Amino acid sequence: DVKVTQSSRYLVKRTGEKVFLECVQDMDHENMFWYRQDPGLGLRLIYFSYDVKMKEKGDIPEGYSVSREKKERFSLILESASTNQTSMYLCASSVTVIRANVLTFGAGSRLTVL
Amino acid sequence: ELKVEQNPLFLSMQEGKNYTIYCNYSTTSDRLYWYRQDPGKSLESLFVLLSNGAVKQEGRLMASLDTKARLSTLHITAAVHDLSATYFCAVYLETNAGKSTFGDGTTLTVKP
């Protein structure tokens, strides 16, 4: 089974801190994604990547950046955390098989910014 | 901009009953996914629907896709408590840089 591992399940940070959320997948998937999930707003795509060193903005990239130096690792960076970035962050990966791009999600990282 | 709407957003039903969750989307697509999220857990893939008229079934859940109507349904037959979860549909568009856009999710509670 594909595993997508997010390094931290729960984080508490202070406003203005720099935050790194790490995601590693072990099945050689080309595509990796960062979503945030908020009550009443569903899942919203922050950034995604189709290859090493490539990144694409999603629907809500403001206040975030990403890094993909290795195929298996996709990091989400909050340069200066703010309280409105308190959320559940979900990493996902996929590979195109018979036209299907099924997402495999990590367990999530719940970030609280005080 | 692609919009994906699910209804209902909340569904409380008795065990043994049938019900349908609807997923409407605004732009032509022939790829639609259903995911399940248990409370406190992450999302897991349920179904992949890749063509008009596609129907997939697993246990008490059956999903279908009508690309002409831009509608997918997730039908629950004889619900049991274990089906309590949040169900998301997601639409994939090649022209949307290969992104999947999710609906807001339907939270299903099955009561004894």
Image (spheres, coloured by chain):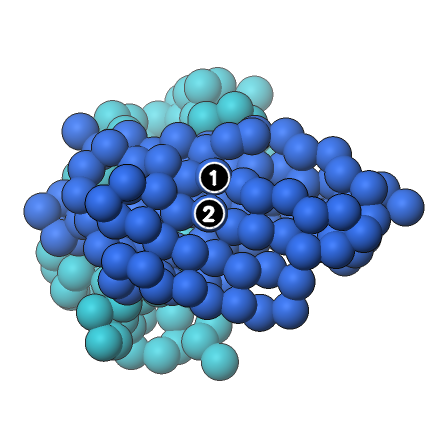
Chain colours: A cyan, B blue
The image shows residue A104, relative to residue B106, as above or below, that is below
- Residue B59, picture quadrant: bottom right
Amino acid bearing label 2: Thr
CB contact under 8 Å: marks 2 and 1: yes
Amino acid bearing label 1: Tyr
The image shows residue A6, relative to residue A59, as above or below, that is below
Residue B49's disc is none
Judge from the rendering whether residue A110 lies leftward or rightward of residue A66; answer left or right.
right
**Residue located 52% across and 50% down the image:** B74
Q: Position of residue A86 (x, y in %)?
A: 51, 27
Disc 1 chain ID: B
Q: Neighbour class for label 1 at 10 Å: few (<14), some, many (≥20)?
A: some
Considering the numbered disc 1 on the image, is that residue within a helix, a strand or a loop? strand
Residue wearing tag 2:
B73
Q: Earlier in the sequence, mark 2 or mark 1?
A: 1
**Residue located 15% across and 65% down the image:** A52
Disc 2 chain ID: B
Judge from the rendering whether residue B3 lies leftward or rightward of residue A5; answer left or right.
left
**Residue located 24% across and 33% down the image:** B26
Residue B22's disc is 1
- Residue A50, picture quadrant: bottom left
Judge from the rendering whether residue A36 lies leftward or rightward of residue A71; answer left or right.
right
Considering the numbered disc 2 on the image, is that residue within a helix, a strand or a loop? strand
